[in-house]
């Protein structure tokens, strides 16, 4: 059912679900501002405190470890207690730890702060995914996922030039304090506007509620997470392992791209801040394209082939352009081509997240927590291994490894079936809390 099918304009579906998705875009953009700001400020920190590249890689990895470890608990909390509550809480906590970074003065303390920020940021994407499961109908699912994946791109676009400018004007300590304050403001706005379920929102009309609920099964408010059924599914293992491998490549852009542009492509820091936002501009644009294409292909060929096509187009496309981009001599063309690799990555990522709802809608937070934990295990390896590969074999080899990993991740999708739902035989209801 679409809004055009209601002849009376007063009966057409409201669009509150897309306002909710807009908040998810902002939340994830802020999440990535606070994830990437350290990478941009790193050069100043290295100069002030004598932090080596290898030490810096370990600090980057500390974030990835904290982020990975708390993915599953964060997603499960959203399923059991509601993503609105959990998302509000996690924004406030990671913002507090971001502000705390301003008081650090040694490599070990920076690593501890980054671990805590990673831990606090962990529930963000999984609970955004759970919000999409609650608020977005099946026919728009990938576009709903694209809304928060696009936040990754927006955060990445604005973080390098904004943080580079803030560090130059106010210094790195004030930069982290300001980033933390922004989170408190967003958390308050999200809490005041959102609701856990669409039927609780006063602005959602009956037409939009029918659209959201059409074809969706009824469910109790609170249930235990059926971990046995989830981990018994080979389909789930294929999704999770492929995302683990893909996470290695993603974190090359998250952590090393700015320093690669400065130290390898020899662009000045402020100019590098602008150019290093290019992968995230591609990420934001291609995530939206991935959502639209995924929904269209699914409507034509079904979820199995629709999700598979989009993931493999994105992963194989990313591998191809990374192999080319690392070898291009002109620094500006190299940045543009490598950035296309990030865009293809995002095109595929949307369908990965949509698949977690396809196969386990009622527990999409928990399942996406497992998947994103795996992706960030790959992400924790990448920041430390990339400078070692670059130092031993050169940056072309380091980028080739990133291309190979994302290409391999796409091969797993020859065997993934997004139409195969998790069998919830051991799902035992429990009393609401």
Image (spheres, grey):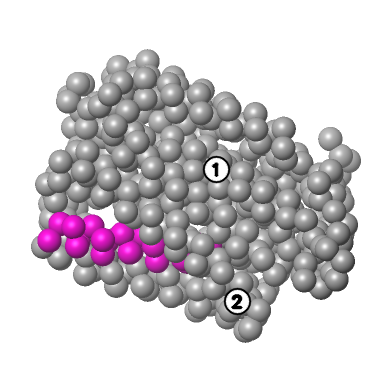
Residue at screen point 43% across, 24% down: 178
Q: Nearer the viewer, residue 43 or 112?
A: 43
The residue singled out by tag 2 in the image is: 296
- State yes or no: discs 1 and 2 in contact (Cβ < 8 Å): no
Q: Looking at the image, is 302 positioned above or below residue 162?
A: below
Residue 133: name its quadrant: bottom right
Q: Is residue 73 visible?
A: yes
Residue at screen point 21% across, 69% down: 324
Disc 1/disc 2 C-alpha distance (Å): 25 Å
**Residue 316 screen position, x and y as percent:** 37, 73
Please, what secondary structure does the residue beneath circle 2 have?
helix
Magenta stretch, main secondary structure, is: helix
Q: Which residues are magenta?
A: 330-350
Q: Looking at the image, is 414 positioned above or below residue 51?
A: below
Asked whether 18 falls inside the magenta stretch, the response is no
Q: Is residue 296 left or right of residue 199?
A: left
**Residue 350 screen position, x and y as percent:** 53, 62
The residue singled out by tag 1 in the image is: 26
Q: Which quadrant is the N terminus positioned in?
A: bottom right
Residue at screen point 26% across, 42% down: 273
Q: Residue furthest bottom?
A: 301
The numbered dot on residue 7 is none
**Residue 410 screen position, x and y as percent:** 43, 71
Q: Which quadrant is the C terminus positioned in?
A: top right
Give the class, few, some or many, for how many residues have Cα within 10 Å of label 2's Cα (few <14, many ≥20). some
Q: Looking at the image, is 173 positioned above or below residue 60?
A: above
Please, what secondary structure does the residue beneath circle 1 have?
helix
Residue 9: name its quadrant: bottom right
Residue at screen point 63% across, 83% down: 300
Q: Is residue 326 left or right of residue 167?
A: left
Nearest to N terminus: mark 1 or mark 2: 1
């Amino acid at each position: 059912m679409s809004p055009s099918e209601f002849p009376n304009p007063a009966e057409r579906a409201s669009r509150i679900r897309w306002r909710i998705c807009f908040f998810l875009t902002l939340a994830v953009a802020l999440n990535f501002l606070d994830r990437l700001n350290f990478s941009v400020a790193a050069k100043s920190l290295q100069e002030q405190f004598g932090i080596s590249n290898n030490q810096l890689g370990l600090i980057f990895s500390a974030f990835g470890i904290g982020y990975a470890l708390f993915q599953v608990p964060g997603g499960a909390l959203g399923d059991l207690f509601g993503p609105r509550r959990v998302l509000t809480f996690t924004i406030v906590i990671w913002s507090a730890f971001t502000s705390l970074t301003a008081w650090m003065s040694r490599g070990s303390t920076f690593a501890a702060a980054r671990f805590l920020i990673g831990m606090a940021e962990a529930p963000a994407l999984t609970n955004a995914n759970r919000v999409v499961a609650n608020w977005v109908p099946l026919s728009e699912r990938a576009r709903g996922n694209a809304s928060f994946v696009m936040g990754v791109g927006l955060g990445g676009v604005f973080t390098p030039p904004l943080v580079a400018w803030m560090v130059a004007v106010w210094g790195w300590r004030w930069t982290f304090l300001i980033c933390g304050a922004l989170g408190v403001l967003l958390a308050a706005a999200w809490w005041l506007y959102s609701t856990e379920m669409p039927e609780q929102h006063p602005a959602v009309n009956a037409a939009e509620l029918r659209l959201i609920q059409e074809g969706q099964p009824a469910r109790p408010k609170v249930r235990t997470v059926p971990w046995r059924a989830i981990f018994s599914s080979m389909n789930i293992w294929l999704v999770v392992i492929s995302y683990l491998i893909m996470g290695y490549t993603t974190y090359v852009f998250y952590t090393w791209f700015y320093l690669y542009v400065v130290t390898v492509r020899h662009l000045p820091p402020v100019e590098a801040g602008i150019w290093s936002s290019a992968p995230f501009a591609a990420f934001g644009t291609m995530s939206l394209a991935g959502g639209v294409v995924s929904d269209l292909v699914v409507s034509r060929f079904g979820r199995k082939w629709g999700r598979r096509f989009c993931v493999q187009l994105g992963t194989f496309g990313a591998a191809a352009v990374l192999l080319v981009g690392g070898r291009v001599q002109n620094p500006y063309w190299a940045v543009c081509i490598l950035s296309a690799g990030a865009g293809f990555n995002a095109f595929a990522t949307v369908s990965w997240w949509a698949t977690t709802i396809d196969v386990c809608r009622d527990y999409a937070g928990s399942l996406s927590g497992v998947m994103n934990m795996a992706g960030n295990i790959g992400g924790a390896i990448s920041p430390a291994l990339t400078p070692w590969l670059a130092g031993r074999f050169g940056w072309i080899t380091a980028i080739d490894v990133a291309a190979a990993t994302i290409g391999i991740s796409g091969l797993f999708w020859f065997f993934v079936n997004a139409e195969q739902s998790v069998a919830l035989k051991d799902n035992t209801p429990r009393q609401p809390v």
